[in-house]
Amino acid sequence: DTGVSQDPRHKITKRGQNVTFRCDPISEHNRLYWYRQTLGQGPEFLTYFQNEAQLEKSRLLSDRFSAERPKGSFSTLEIQRTEQGDSAMYLCASSLMGTGLDGYTFGSGTRLTVV
Amino acid sequence: DQQVKQNSPSLSVQEGRISILNCDYTNSMFDYFLWYKKYPAEGPTFLISISSIKDKNEDGRFTVFLNKSAKHLSLHIVPSQPGDSAVYFCAASEGGSQGNLIFGKGTKLSVKP
């Protein structure tokens, strides 16, 4: 297993365009998380899935953001009508369902730049 | 309002000495605390965790201490190695939820040979 894969690694888009990111978790992991990290900040929680069910969403996830995990495997995160404030590193992570002590495995992230 | 605070943006330590990274939190409902390490251009990597019912957890060169009354935790790295140079994030969650980790802003550790 190659770990958590995210595609693309970098994305530059014009303001107002839609973008979609993909995350492939570790195959046996049933939980998948999306976080966002801006410069000088720690990762901020966006949403997470257990299998195909989206169990929790942050208030940071405005109605321009949507995430799916249709078959409980890979996930996509779409941002519609991008704004400059959306520029950030988008991190995906996965884990087995367990205690809060187990930690996640993060991917290397997708860096989004909105110009 | 930040619930998890890492007040030192950076720390420089000599190789072989102890590195101590600190973290304070405000939410008394947090019951799990984790440390992650991040190298440039990579995602964070889980290091070590502790539950609120313990005051110490050790894993090799890494030890995490929790002081619940002070709402403070620290990560000790002994001995420090140049490969430990990275950004370290403290994170916390409440209610046994694995879904929503609250991260601090991170501390950049530099270990000099």
Image (cartoon, coloured by chain):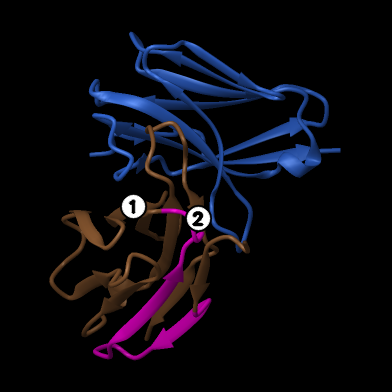
Chain colours: A brown, B blue
Q: What stretch is highlighted in magenta?
A: A8-29
**Which residue occupies the foreground of this view, B100 or A38?**
B100
Query: What chain letter is assigned to the residue under label 1?
Result: A
The image shows residue A34 at horizontal and vertical percentages of 35, 60
Counting other residues with Cα less than 10 Å from the Cα at mark 1, is it few (<14), some (14-19), or many (20 or more)? many
Chain containing mark 2: A
Q: Does B80 sit left or right of B19 as displayed?
A: right
| Residue drawn at point x = 26 percent, y = 71 percent | A68
* Quadrant where the C terminus of chain B is found in the figure: top right
Residue at 26 percent across and 82 percent down: it is A82
Q: Is residue B94 visible?
A: yes
Quadrant position of the N terminus of chain B in the picture: top left
Mark 1 and mark 2: span between their CA atoms?
13 Å
Q: Residue furthest right?
A: B113
Residue labelled with disc 1: A44
Marks 1 and 2 in Cβ contact (< 8 Å): no
The residue lying toward the viewer, choosing from A14 and B97, is: B97
Residue A106: mark: 2
Give residue A57's position: percent from left, percent from top. 19, 56
Q: Earlier in the sequence, mark 1 or mark 2?
A: 1
